């Protein structure tokens, strides 16, 4: 893979002694590749990522992998809050929801799969359940890379997880009431076990709905309503079972 060097000044030393164990995917949310590169390399902007992939599959390296790029902001995953110190960040050129959100081209996805395969080989602590979108680590703030990103295709190429339930499989019940405390508490517990920051209150509040919507955006993108239905819960339980098997392998 050819990588174009475009160094950004926006980086620092990684903090702490935790391994790099998250691959975090974003969209640029800007009108062009040039605008995105300019911002990611602008000292005044104070943002960056390790890599950027344009729509034709060209890969730009902005920050060395051993450095802490500034792409995650305030976030959380499985007890960690300094996501930047634990993650490799990849920006995918896409105008995002503000400027005309569209599917990610095949050339871009193929380049991502190639790049991610190498990253994961170099950072063995990045297990499939730790290939995430920005929306997973910051459900209240972010929605990228969004519902048009093909997580299922990426998982088929050995990067990340995907539920083994088919899209066509009807849910046994999609009318789970948000007022059912026991069911809400169980959903909160499962989401927290998977990695999301969510209150363990049994109350269906704003933070819980945001976490459910983030999970759906990643693992059930054709229906994102933030409701704790049985189909969402079944997908979450399946992913936890997959992770458990990976951990035992």
Image (tube, grey):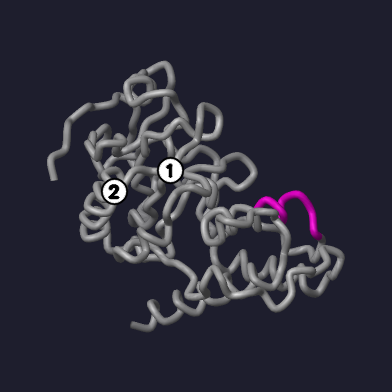
Q: What residue does disc 2 label?
A: 112
2 or 1: mark nearer the eye: 1
Disc ID at residue 64: none
| 239 relative to 178, above or below | below
| Image coordinates for residue 220, horizontal then vertical, percent | 56, 61
Tell me: 169 left or right of 1: right
Describe the element under mark 1 as helix, strand or loop.
Answer: loop
Dot 1: few (<14), some (14–19), or many (≥20) neighbours within 10 Å? few
Q: Is residue 206 magenta?
A: yes
> Residue at the right extreme?
179
Is residue 52 something one can see in this rendering?
no
Which residues make up the magenta segment? 204-211
Residue indicated by mark 1: 103
Name, please, the residue furthest toward the left.
2
Percent x, y for residue 3? 16, 38
Give the residue at the far top of this rendering.
44
Q: Main secondary structure of the magenta part?
A: helix
In this rendering, the answer to whether 211 lies above or below 102 is below
Residue 178: image quadrant is bottom right
Residue at disc 2, secondary structure: helix
Quadrant in the rendering for residue 37: top left
**x, y percentage for residue 147?**
52, 49
Report the residue at 34% width, 39% height from top: 68
| 182 horizontally vs 13: left or right | right
Q: Residue at x 55, y 29 (%)?
A: 98
Which residue is painted at 74% across and 69% down in the image?
174
């Amino acid at each position: 893979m050819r990588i174009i060097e475009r160094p950004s000044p926006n980086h620092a030393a990684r903090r702490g002694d935790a391994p790099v164990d998250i691959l975090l995917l974003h969209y640029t949310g800007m009108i062009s590749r040039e605008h995105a590169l300019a911002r990611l390399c602008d000292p005044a902007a104070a943002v960056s990522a390790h890599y950027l992939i344009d729509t034709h599959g060209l890969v730009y390296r902005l920050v060395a992998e051993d450095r802490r790029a500034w792409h995650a902001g305030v976030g959380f995953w499985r007890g960690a809050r300094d996501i930047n110190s634990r993650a490799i960040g990849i920006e995918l050129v896409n105008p995002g929801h503000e400027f005309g959100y569209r599917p990610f081209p095949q050339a871009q996805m193929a380049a991502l799969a190639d790049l991610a395969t190498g990253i994961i080989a170099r950072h063995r602590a990045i297990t499939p359940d730790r290939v995430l979108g920005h929306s997973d680590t910051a459900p209240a703030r972010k929605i990228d890379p969004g519902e048009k990103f093909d997580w299922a295709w990426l998982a088929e190429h050995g990067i990340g997880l995907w539920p083994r339930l088919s899209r066509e499989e009807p849910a046994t019940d999609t009318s789970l009431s948000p007022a059912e405390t026991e069911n809400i508490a169980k959903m909160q517990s499962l989401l927290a076990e998977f990695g999301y920051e969510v209150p363990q209150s049994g109350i269906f509040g704003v933070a819980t709905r945001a976490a459910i919507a983030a999970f759906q955006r990643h693992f059930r993108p054709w229906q994102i309503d933030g409701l704790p239905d049985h189909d969402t819960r079944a997908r979450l339980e399946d992913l936890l079972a997959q992770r458990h098997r990976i951990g035992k392998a």
